[in-house]
Image (cartoon, grey):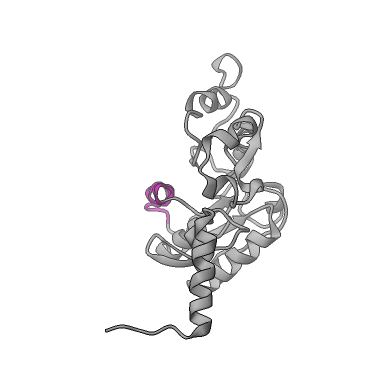
């Protein structure tokens, strides 16, 4: 069976081909991405999550296994895919989704509504983590972290054009070393987590040792409990 495109459909198809020919991500062209088996709206205001990000969801589900009503903080939520996926899988959980970008928060809000979890995914405004003060989760839950992780000096050389030229810089660039945002979160995390509560981080390639040193602190003294 063959379908015939009308004039409008043909124009949309040709425009989509033109956009993809300059390496614009297909997800931005279609405005959609599947994550954790759920549908999500995506726009150039948010990162396109790679499949490996689903490991963050797996780790979080394991971390809160057995906790009746966990409180979870998702920092740098972007499209809300992690927060919404966790809320969808944990019916008693409350997942605070935080982002510096108001445009990203609006997309996350729409995705929470689309997937039926808007009542359990509050979206505080402002910079993480300070915007959570007074909202209730401090020292009562665990935390995802999806802050920027790309080094300023290496961005043009290391990233694919789809990422470098189209995804939001605010969500990509962490600073000269690529670990600046992670360090801020690591140092603030103990204020918001219960004792022995995990901080689950998605980090950039090659950042493991640098972040270990930040967590251990000067001379391995362990300045962070996360």
Quarter of the figure with residue 2 = bottom left
The residue shown at (69%, 52%) is 100
Of residues 49 and 202, the one nearer the viewer is: 49
Measured from the top left, where is residue 181 in percent x and y? 64, 37
- Where residue 125 appears, as percent x and y from the top left, is 71, 58
Left or right: 2 as drawn, with respect to 149: left
Question: In this picture, is 80 found above or below 162?
Answer: below
Tell which residue pokes out farthest to the top in this image: 219
Is 62 part of what is drawn in magenta? yes
Dominant secondary structure, magenta: helix
In the figure, is residue 89 to the left or right of 193?
left
Corner quadrant of residue 153: top right
Mark yes or no: residue 117 visible.
no
Camera-nearest residue between 202 and 224: 202
- Give the magenta range: 51-67
**Residue that sits furthest to the left in the current view:** 1
Residue at the image position 45 percent from the left and 59 percent from the top? 86
Q: How many marks?
A: 0
The picture places residue 166, in percent across and down from the top left corner, at: 59, 52
Between 194 and 104, the one nearer to me in the picture? 104
Image quarter where the N terminus lies is bottom left
* Residue at figure coordinates x 48%, y 28% from the top left: 206
**195 up-or-down from 54: above or below:** above
**Residue 93 covered by magenta stretch:** no
x and y, in percent, of residue 212 in the image: 51, 25
Q: Nearer the viewer, residue 70 or 182?
A: 182
Is residue 46 in view? yes
């Amino acid at each position: 069976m063959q379908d015939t495109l009308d004039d409008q459909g043909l124009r949309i198809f040709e425009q989509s081909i033109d956009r993809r020919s300059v390496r614009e991500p297909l997800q931005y062209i279609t405005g959609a991405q599947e994550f954790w088996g759920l549908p999500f709206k995506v726009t150039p205001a948010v990162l396109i999550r790679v499949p490996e990000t689903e490991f963050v969801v797996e780790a979080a589900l394991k971390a809160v296994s057995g906790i009746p009503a966990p409180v979870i903080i998702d920092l740098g939520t972007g499209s809300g895919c992690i927060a919404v996926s966790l809320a969808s899988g944990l019916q008693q959980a409350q997942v605070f989704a935080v982002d510096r970008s108001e445009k990203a928060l609006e997309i996350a809000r729409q995705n929470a509504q689309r997937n039926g979890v808007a009542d359990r995914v509050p979206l505080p405004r402002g910079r993480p983590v300070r915007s959570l003060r007074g909202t209730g989760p401090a020292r009562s839950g665990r935390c995802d972290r999806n802050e920027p992780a790309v080094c300023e000096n290496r961005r043009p050389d290391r990233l694919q054009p789809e990422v470098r030229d189209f995804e939001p810089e605010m969500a990509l660039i962490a600073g000269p070393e690529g670990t600046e945002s992670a360090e801020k979160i690591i140092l603030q995390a103990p204020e918001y987590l219960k004792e022995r509560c995990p901080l689950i981080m998605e980090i950039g390639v090659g950042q493991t040792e640098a972040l270990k040193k930040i967590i251990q602190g000067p001379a391995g003294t362990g300045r962070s409990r996360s």
